[in-house]
Image (cartoon, grey):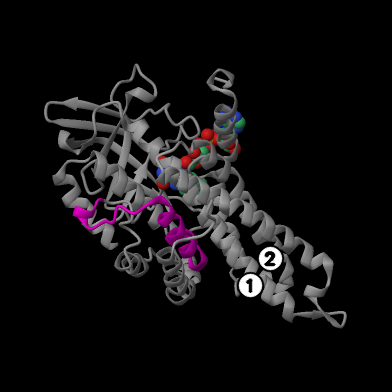
Amino acid sequence: MEFAFSPEQEELVRTLRAFARRELAPRSAHYDRSGEFPWDLWRAMGELGLLGLRAPVQYGGQDADMVTMGIAIEEVARGDFACTYGIQLAGLAGEILGKNGSAELCTRWLPGTVAGEIVVALGLTEPGAGSDAANLACRAERQGDEYVITGEKSGISLAMAAQAVILFAKTDVTAKARGITAFLVPLDLPGVARQRLGDMGTRAVGRAVLSLDHVRIPASHRLGPEGTGFYQVMQGFDYNRLLIALACLGVAEISLEETIAYVKDRRAFGKTLATFEGVSFPLAEAATLIDAARWLCYRGLWLADRGEKYTKESAMAKWWAPKLAVETIHQCLLLHGHYGYTDELPFAQRLRDVIGLEIGDGTAEVMKIVVARELMGREFLPY
Ligand SMILES: Cc1cc2nc3c(=O)[nH]c(=O)nc-3n(C[C@H](O)[C@H](O)[C@H](O)COP(=O)(O)OP(=O)(O)OC[C@H]3O[C@@H](n4cnc5c(N)ncnc54)[C@H](O)[C@@H]3O)c2cc1C
């Protein structure tokens, strides 16, 4: 058993920690307030190779292992949570498009995504289908050499900035999950409309509703055979849930470190705050839980790299880590007293940001259904 990163991975941690501190953290509050998409940060991540980790090498990617993905997202989160969406979504695009798209589609979309010049969103959720993700209403109907897509996707991260979306639609309305097919849909086509949602957090990347009204795309934009879309996205979600968990923990870790420094310095009743057990015990508890959650995530990614099953670990980490991060950041905010409540310190923004991923990619309840299914078997599912 080896609980250590390799020397190369340690070097990656050092490089990205410095990048997050120098390039991301100083601009995070600005982008949160303005709601502008941080194209400069995306390009900077592209230059460092962070947006091509899961893309095939021939399209500029690195085909990196999952543990490396985990390190990248955990470190970037320490500087800016919104930027972790870049690693997630470019990773999913690299994976889904790279494995299922034609060479022509990959050549058109992947190098730009890897460079941080193109954003490809992922459109699964609909107004009437979130947790019950196979129950899609969006339809793709084959007409000769084209598909005609009609429907609405809701809550789609990055959708205001994106030039394309990997979209999931029903090609067989009589089937549930096996009737879902993935498509690459450019967002400048006639019939596409988008509307921004007024989110409480991660405002720099934002989310939107995408409406598609008889949008025509060439059949060559289908990703993989008909009926394989749900499988593709669920495979991606298995590891993406671990990445989300590590992103949340990255923010919790930096908050904890800053708070430890603060309470060692701030004085009350003639002593530093750190001297009071009412202050130090919650920090000790948070550090314990973060350490446990973090190693659960890396264990899941390690299993993934070995080609072993890790659905249970991924769902465990996804329900626990975002909740733990919310609780930790809340505690850190409180330990900064009234300063913690201002927008001069990052805790309020971090709290707003992290709450989003208690929901995104599957809520805690849905994750516990997955854990229970893996523990007890499908026959004990409620449906
Ligand atoms: C920050 C953020 C980013 C997102 N990004 C994307 C994106 O890029 N692409 C995309 O496609 N989607 C995205 N989503 C959508 C997200 O995946 C869905 O919001 C999520 O799957 C939950 O679906 P819902 O919102 O429809 O909630 P619902 O499914 O309506 O659930 C509402 C509540 O009921 C609970 N619930 C539902 N079913 C059960 C059950 N069987 N047992 C117990 N409780 C249950 C849920 O846990 C939840 O608390 C994002 C969401 C957020 C918040």
**Residue 181, percent across and down?**
29, 30
Whether residue 90 can be seen here: yes
Magenta-highlighted residues: 56-83
Q: Residue furthest front?
A: 1
Viewport quadrant of the C terminus: top right
- Examine the residues drawn in magenta and state their main secondary structure: helix
Looking at the image, residue 8 sits to the left or right of residue 327; the answer is: left
Marker disc for residue 258: 1
Classify 10 Å Cα crowding around label 1: few (below 14), some (14-19), many (20 and above): few
| Rendering coords of residue 199 (x, y %) | 51, 53
Residue farthest along the right direction in this orientation: 269
Residue drawn at (73%, 62%), measured in percent from left and top? 284
| Disc 2: which residue | 332
Q: Do the residues labelled 1 and 2 touch (CB within 8 Å)?
A: yes
The three-letter code of the residue at mark 2 reads Cys
Q: Which residue is at 42% across, 72% downward?
A: 15
Give coordinates of residue 309: x percent, y percent.
46, 36
Compare marks 1 and 2 and give the one earlier in the sequence. Answer: 1
Q: Quadrant of residue 53?
A: bottom left
With respect to residue 141, does 16 lie above or below?
below
Label 2: few (<14), some (14–19) or many (≥20) C-alpha neighbours in 10 Å = many
Q: Which mark is residue 184?
A: none
Residue type at mark 1?
A: Glu
In the rendered structure, does residue 370 fall within the stretch colored magenta? no
Left or right of residue 135, residue 328 in this image: right
Looking at this view, is 152 or 113 the one in front?
113
Q: Is mark 2 on a helix, strand or loop?
A: helix
- Quick one: 58 or 183, which is closer to the camera? 58
The CA span between labels 1 and 2 is: 8 Å
Is residue 75 rendered magenta in the image?
A: yes
